[in-house]
Amino acid sequence: MAKSTKTAAAAPKPAAKAAKAAPKAATATAEKSEKIAKTQIIDMVADKTTLNKKQAGEAVASMLDVVVEALKGGKSVGLPGLGTFSVAKTAARQGVRPGTSEKITIPAGKKVRFKVASTLKTGL
């Protein structure tokens, strides 16, 4: 016996609410750039060096670990031609809880900042 492959007609979706106008891009030429995954970086490092993929993966992972540990220690990390990662303190501030509109105090904390190197900025 063959099974029936009939499917019920999908119910029409309710009309969408009127969307707010999207904010305009900072520049008319702003385009969404493609994201490169860590595995793709590893492949690129392996292609540009004499390392195999396993060694390139270990090198990339080690570099990222060193950057993270330095930032956790409060140090800045400068990568010539790319930019500088640094840790900045944020002050406590007032905020609004989404959904309830309750006013809350957001505690002081830290965030990672990145300043692009001028050579990269002018080269884009």
Image (cartoon, grey):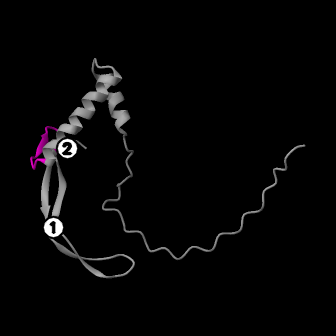
Percent across and percent down for residue 40 are 37, 34
- Range drawn in magenta: 73-83
Residue 28 appears in the picture as rendered? yes
x and y percentages locating residue 90 in the rendered image = 15, 64
Q: Is residue 103 above or below residue 70?
A: below
Is 81 inside the magenta-drawn segment?
Answer: yes
Q: Is residue 35 above or below residue 40?
A: below
Instruction: Tell me: 24 left or right of 77.
Output: right
Kindly identify which residue carries mark 2. Answer: 68
Residue shown at 57% from the left, 73% from the top:
16
Residue type beneath disc 1? Ala
Q: Residue furthest left?
A: 75
Work out whether mark 2 precedes mark 1 in sequence or the reverse, and give the earlier one: 2
Q: Nearer the viewer, residue 120 or 106?
A: 106
The residue labelled by disc 1 is: 108
Q: CA–CA distance between discs 2 and 1?
A: 21 Å
Crowdedness of circle 1 by 10 Å Cα count: few (<14), some, many (20+)?
few
Quarter of image, res 47: top left
* Quarter assignment of residue 7: bottom right
Which residue lies most toward the front here?
Answer: 1
Q: Main secondary structure of the magenta part?
A: loop
Magenta stretch holds residue 94: no
Q: Are marks 2 and 1 in contact (CB under 8 Å)?
A: no
SS category of the residue bearing label 2: helix
Residue ranking furthest to the top: 50
On the rendered image, what quadrant is the C terminus found in?
A: top left
Q: Could you tell me which residue is drawn at 28 percent across and 28 percent down?
A: 58
The three-letter amino acid code for the residue at tag 2 is Val
Q: Secondary structure at mark 1?
A: loop
Q: Which mark is residue 91?
A: none
**Which residue appears at 13% of the width and 37% of the height?**
80
Viewport quadrant of the N terminus: top right
